[in-house]
Image (cartoon, rainbow, N blue to C red):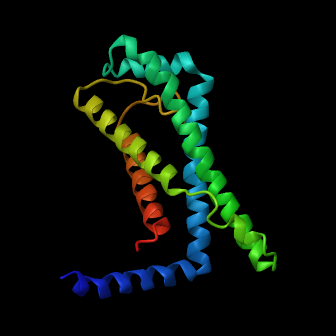
Amino acid sequence: MRNAAFPANALGSEFKEKLRANFLLSSLSILLGAALGAVFFYAGLQKHLAPFQFAEAVMAYRLFPQSLVGLVAAVLPWVELTAGFFLVLGYLLEAAGRIAMVLGLSAGGLLVGGIKRRSCLLIIAALALVFIIVMSVTMARGLEIDCGCGLFFQRQVGPVPILENILMLLLAAALYWWEYAGE
């Protein structure tokens, strides 16, 4: 049975390699990945720069005991900052490496694939999923509170922030698939 599945995996790998060889699609993946990382970096930075407002937003969800609100408000921005920073850095180094290779510089090969972006994509996907669940539960409970998203303060929990997080989750999943070698 295992041998019967091998040709399908080989065809899938060949298809993905053809997609990766497409300059436009590769450039688009780099651009979208860097943008996704930048959004999370910016959101984490906003939360880090306004810790008291973010702690109040976390408290308004009424999901954590008051003793854990400070911990969540202190750790979450750093997770977003770190995942976003390394995702952007990984994609920027990838772009620089590819440009260097096109220019005939052999050192460009060292930059391509240097930072593994899949870990950052998994963290971002997990964060987006948690945000979707938390905001959905909050809407179901009928609470009208600030989402604490970090991008736009004084933004209510509602369908738009949930949809945005669904799109970021789908983008992270698609980029993870793109990055995964799939051997």
Q: Nearer the viewer, residue 146 or 106?
A: 106
Position of residue 21 in the picture relative to residue 1 (left or right): right
Residue 81 x, y percent position in the rendering:
58, 38
Q: Is residue 30 above or below residue 106?
A: above
**Which residue is pictured at 38% across the width and 38% down the height?**
131
Where does the image place residue 166, in percent across and percent down from the top left?
37, 50
Which part of the image, by quadrant, shows the N terminus? Answer: bottom left
Q: Where is residue 151 in the image (x, y as percent from the top left)?
A: 55, 36
Please report the residue visible at 63 percent of the width from the left and 24 percent of the height from the top.
49
Identify the residue at image location x=50%, y=66%.
Answer: 179
Tell me what residue is drawn at x 69 percent, y 60 percent. 93
Tell me: 159 left or right of 27.
left
25 is higher (above) or lower (below) than 79: below
Residue nearest the observer in this picture, 29 or 160: 29
Q: Is residue 152 visible?
A: no
Q: Which residue lies furthest to the left in this view?
A: 1
Q: Can residue 39 be seen in this view?
A: yes
In the picture, the quarter occupied by the C terminus is: bottom left
167 left or right, relative to 49: left
The x and y percentages for residue 91 are 63, 59
**Residue 81 falls left or right of residue 66:** right
- Snapshot quadrant of residue 159: top left
